[in-house]
Image (spheres, rainbow, N blue to C red):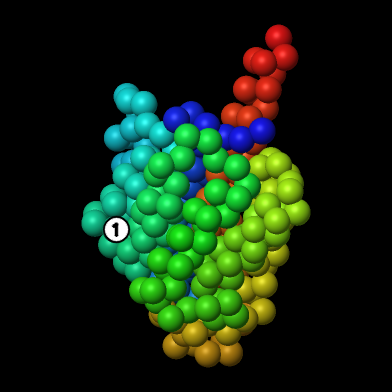
Amino acid sequence: MTFRNMEGKPVLQKMVAAIQENKAYLGEVDGLIGDGDHGMNMNKGFTMFGERIAGREVSFTEGLDELGTLLFTEIGGSMGPIYGTVFTDMAEAGASLDEIDAASFATMLEAGLNGLCEIVDARVGDKTLVDTLSPALDAVRKAADEGKELTAALLDMKEAAAIGRDSTKELVAKFGRSSRLGERSRGVLDAGATSCCIILTAIADGIVERISSCTSRMQR
C-alpha cells in the first residue's frame, strides 16, 4: 500500500516526539567531540514545530516544508540550515503527491540529499549526517527498483540508516568543530548522523503505523 500525504500529521508528530525523547542523548553524543548543543537546538526547533501544528491539519509534505523553514530561519548553529534544506527540498519534491510509494519517497530523499550537497561539501565517509542519509536513500531506491512495497522499503531504510550512523564511529571528522580533533574524533558517533537516524526511523515507523491502520480499517 501507499501512504496518503494528507494523513501525514501523526508521522510529523512522531518525528517531534523522537527528538524530544532523545534530547539528552544527542547532547551527550555531541558533547564528546562537539559543543554539546545539538540535542538542545534540535529539541527547540522540533518542539516549536510541534506546537505550531498541534491545532490544525497539515499534510506530510506541508509539515516538512514548515519544519524545514522554521529550522532554517529560527534555529541557530549549523544544523538549522542543514536540516532546513533537507526537509524543504524533500517537501518540494513531494508537494504534488496525493499518494507516496517507495519510488516517490526515494525521489523525496534524493532531493533532500542533493539539496544538502549543494550547500555543504561533506560526502559519505566524512563523519556527518550524509553517512546516514545517503545509504538510507540507496536502500529505498533499491527497494523501489525491486518492486517492494513502501513498508518493506522503509524497513530497509531503517536498517541502512542505523548502519550508516554506526559507521561514523570509526571515521575521522572532516567538518565542523570536531574536525579540529583529527584522529581524536575517531571512536565516537557523529551527532548529526545520529539525529538523522532517529528522524528517519520515526518517519518510517510513523508511515508504517498509518498504513497498518488503514489496512485494518479496510478489512473490517
Residue 25 coordinates in the image, percent (x, y): 54, 55
Task: Estimate how packed mark 1 is, as few (under 14), some (14 to 19) or many (20 or more) residues with alpha carbons within 10 Å.
Answer: many
From this view, report whether residue 97 is shown above or below residue 107.
above
Question: 178 or 53, which is in the foreground?
Answer: 53
x then y, percent, for residue 185: 56, 82
Residue 66: give x, y in percent of width and height: 32, 45
Residue placed furthest toward the top:
220
Question: Secondary structure beneath disc 1?
Answer: helix
In the image, is residue 192 above or below residue 63?
below
Left or right? Give the position of 215 relative to 174: right
Q: Nearer the viewer, residue 174 or 108?
A: 108
**Image point (68%, 22%), residue name:** 215
- Quarter of the figure with the C terminus: top right
Image label count: 1
Q: Is residue 146 above or below residue 56?
A: below
Q: In this view of the protein, can residue 19 be seen by the observer?
A: yes
Identify the residue at horizontal 28%, vertical 62% (top origin): 76
Q: Quadrant of residue 209?
A: top right
Amino acid type for the residue under numbered disc 1: Phe
Residue, disc 1: 72
- The residue at the far left in this view is 73
Residue located at (46% from left, 40% from top)? 97
In the image, is 182 to the left or to the right of 155? left
Please report the residue visible at 65 percent of the width from the left and 55 percent of the height from the top.
140
Q: Quadrant of the N terminus?
A: top right
Tell me, yes or no, if residue 64 can be seen here: no
Where does residue 205 sit, x and y in percent of width and height?
62, 40
